[in-house]
Image: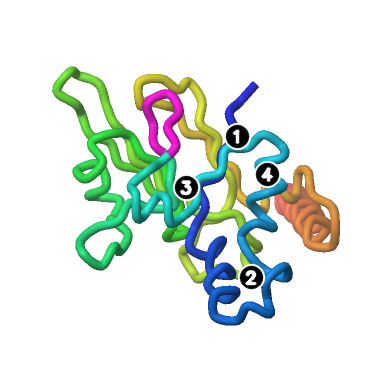
Amino acid sequence: MPDWLLAGGNHDESEDDLVEQDPKLEGLVGSRFLYDPLREMGWNVWSYKRQILDLEYPEIFGTLYGHFYPSGSMGKATTLRSVLNKTHTSFVYSHTHDFGLDLQRTARCGFIQAVNIGTFQPPSRLRPGNWNGAVILSEMGAGQFQIHQFSYDWILETYGEGSYAQELRVARSQAARDREDATQI
């Protein structure tokens, strides 16, 4: 049985700030509408503020998980190239909506890894160059793991329902027909 966790992000908790500014919104918006159902299903939920302010991150098999690791007095997100120098352990995060991987060799001939896993949103909500999809980690132990990427479009084309998933299937079929026609010439 896998461990299920959510390392909340700034967008997840931005609605809490709205409630603080306007108490009439209490009960209508807030991170609890995301966090409470996940906790009821057995997920471990780590709030964004707990990560950033207290530097508390969930750890599974020697790897920390978070929305990002803060840098400097402003608490901006540490870049992929420097996150391992800050955490000194493997770290998986998603703040910038880009995919990236960095490895560093340790003194004991092992490795620590940093992975920015991107985001899982419809392509229409992303900026050019953002990667979206799901990442599964396997063979985990001592901060080392294998990375398996699945694009948003592949997941929807393979398992999705609705108009966008159907558009993807139609495009795949048309591409197959075009390849077949090209070989007939």
- CA gap, disc 3 to disc 1? 16 Å
- CA gap, disc 4 to disc 3? 20 Å
First in sequence, mark 1 or 4: give its number. Answer: 1
First in sequence, mark 3 or 1: give its number. Answer: 1
Going by the numbered disc 3, the residue's amino acid type is: Ile
Magenta residues?
A: 58-64
Label of residue 124 in the image? 2
Q: Residue furthest front?
A: 23
User: Residue 54 at x, y = what percent?
Assistant: 34, 49
First in sequence, mark 4 or 2: give its number. Answer: 4
First in sequence, mark 4 or 3: give its number. Answer: 4
First in sequence, mark 1 or 2: give its number. Answer: 1
Q: Is residue 125 left or right of residue 140?
A: right
- Helix, strand or loop under label 2: helix
Q: Are marks 4 and 3 in contact (CB under 8 Å)?
A: no
- CA gap, disc 3 to disc 2? 18 Å
- CA gap, disc 1 to disc 2? 28 Å
Question: How packed is label 1: few (under 14 Cα within 10 Å), some, or many (20 or more)?
Answer: few
Going by the numbered disc 4, the residue's amino acid type is: Leu
First in sequence, mark 3 or 2: give its number. Answer: 3
Label of residue 4 in the image? 1
Q: Is residue 28 left or right of residue 95?
A: right
Q: Is residue 11 left or right of residue 114?
A: right
Going by the numbered disc 1, the residue's amino acid type is: Trp
Question: How packed is label 2: few (under 14 Cα within 10 Å), some, or many (20 or more)?
Answer: few
| Residue designated by label 4 | 38
User: Residue 107 at x, y = what percent?
Assistant: 14, 23
- Helix, strand or loop under label 1: loop
